[in-house]
Image: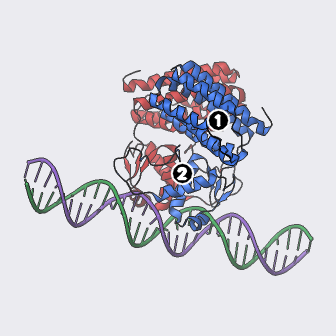
Chain colours: A red, B blue, C green, D purple
DNA sequence: CAACATAAAATCCGATCGGATATCTGATTG
DNA sequence: CAATCAGATATCCGATCGGATTTTATGTTG
């Protein structure tokens, strides 16, 4: 739902209108190029090229790249330049899921306790969206599913009431998102099934079941991705 | 031990000598001012002031501040400027310990399995250092203890073998560090006792006990800090 | 005396410029 | 023919400059 999950100025309910930041547009432009894989993982990112391409000076580009570096989406080498983060290898994907397994089940349990009713409604809306995705172009269907899945987990993390956990997971999911897009990991109906279990438990305000359901979902998700590297 | 836990170029075992980055020195200068509380929590940080004070141009200062923003140590408001992150309130400290409680016991358990022997030696060295701290100036003693404690937890996180968890915890500990310094939270001998239990379990390569010991340590630490806000 | 309007200073955002470094291309030599 | 070296190009790092905005200070008025 949100175009850029982290780093944008929170003008959602802002009462004062502030002039736009050129850096934000640059940020979104580069972010889009990364997500559309126009800039492939590991590919070099030249500041001067972006100057010519976007028609702005170096200053806002550096600022935007600096933010992207904080997210781990790009890496900087002194006197060399920026480059897109390299694709995750098997070990790194393992570590990522290890961390998700620690945080997300807990978040789901807390969400069952703390999440406001309107949050649950948003969750069901996203879930419904995922099921009705019948885009003819499979290439686009990937993107839509991945986007919705990201929102699903983001909503639960937010519903945990713990902002630190929410921020940490937001960072991780950006990489999951990118990984999925790169490998064309297909959206299985299994995920929808698992999501349904999680939502049901949260609706029942049953933290233990929500936690277990999320634990199962993360583990299944891990297995679905691990086959890319030749299984467990 | 490490002066700046995140964001510096890894020149540790670098074979090539690269010219120094002015941005790094600026980064360390501002970092020091934050840690010494010369810039108080919530205090405004003027770029122009730093230009005059450090004698460099805006460019490296903006770069350094951008990195500090990624760590959450400073916050930026468009057309207003940078300011030091506000001091944690009770709710935020609760969230911080909630997250630590999820990650650090796990890391300790993994460290019991994966940590190389030399890592354990480093751990014992830090532990010894913490016990022998008998600085006359209590103001300095705080700082030394906090520094060592940070190293202690950082070593264990690193020993877990999971880089993502290590990075996440490094970010959190920076804030714990700052919080402790601000409130002059005293170093108790209890912490040393708890640390000893953790080290013993890791040396025995006993993950379950290490995990439990860390869990206990985090909980005790939380209680020691919570009294600042009037207890649990 | 308080509140508002106006003016001045401080500050940030973005653009542009020069020096330094890395990388690429092509020629020379053993 | 391969390897090495030199020059040219591309790029980054840091400095400086102007416009836009915010904040503070001052003066005016009810």
Q: Quarter holding the C terminus of chain A?
A: top left
Residue B209: quadrant of the picture? top right
Q: Can you say which quadrant of the picture contains the N terminus of chain A?
A: top right
Which residue corresponds to the image point at 62% horizontal and 24% vertical from the top-left? B213
| Residue closer to the observer: D16 or B101 | B101
Mark 2: few/some/many CA within 10 Å (<14, 14-19, 20+):
many
Of residues A210 and D1, the one nearer the viewer is D1
Chain at tag 1: A
Q: Which mark is residue B222?
A: none
Q: Are marks 2 and 1 on the same chain?
A: no
- Of helix, strand and loop, which one carries label 1? helix
Please tell me which residue lies in front, A196 or A228: A228
Residue marked by disc 1: A158
Q: Position of residue B11 (x, y in %)?
A: 41, 47
Left or right of A126 in this view: B220: right
Q: Which residue is mark 2?
A: B67
Residue B166 location (% of width, % of height): 52, 35
Q: Vertically, is C30 above or below A175?
A: below
Q: Residues within 10 Å of mark 1 (few under 14, many from 20)?
A: many
Residue B100 visible here: yes
Q: Quadrant of residue D25?
A: bottom right
Measuring 45% from the left and 46% from the top, which residue is drawn there? A74
């Amino acid at each position: 739902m949100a175009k850029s999950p982290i780093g944008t100025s929170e003008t959602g309910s802002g009462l004062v209108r502030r002039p736009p930041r050129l850096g934000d547009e640059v940020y979104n432009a580069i972010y889009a190029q990364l997500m559309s894989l126009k800039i492939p993982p590991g590919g070099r990112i030249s500041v001067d090229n972006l100057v010519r391409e976007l028609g702005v000076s170096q200053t806002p580009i550096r600022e935007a790249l600096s933010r992207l570096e904080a997210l781990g989406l790009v890496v900087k080498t002194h006197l060399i330049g920026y480059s897109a983060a390299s694709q995750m290898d098997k070990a790194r994907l393992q570590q990522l899921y290890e961390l998700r397994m620690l945080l997300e089940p807990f978040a789901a349990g807390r969400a069952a306790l703390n999440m406001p009713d309107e949050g649950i409604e948003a969750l069901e809306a996203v879930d419904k969206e995922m099921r009705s995705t019948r885009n003819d172009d499979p290439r686009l269907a990937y993107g839509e599913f991945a986007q919705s899945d990201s929102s699903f987990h983001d909503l639960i993390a937010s519903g945990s009431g713990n902002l630190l956990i929410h921020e940490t997971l937001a960072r991780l999911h950006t990489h999951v998102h990118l990984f999925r897009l790169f490998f064309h990991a297909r959206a299985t109906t299994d995920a929808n099934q698992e999501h349904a279990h999680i939502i049901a438990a949260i609706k029942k305000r049953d933290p233990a079941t929500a936690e277990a359901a999320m634990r199962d979902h993360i583990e299944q998700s891990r297995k679905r991705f691990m086959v890319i590297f030749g299984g467990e």
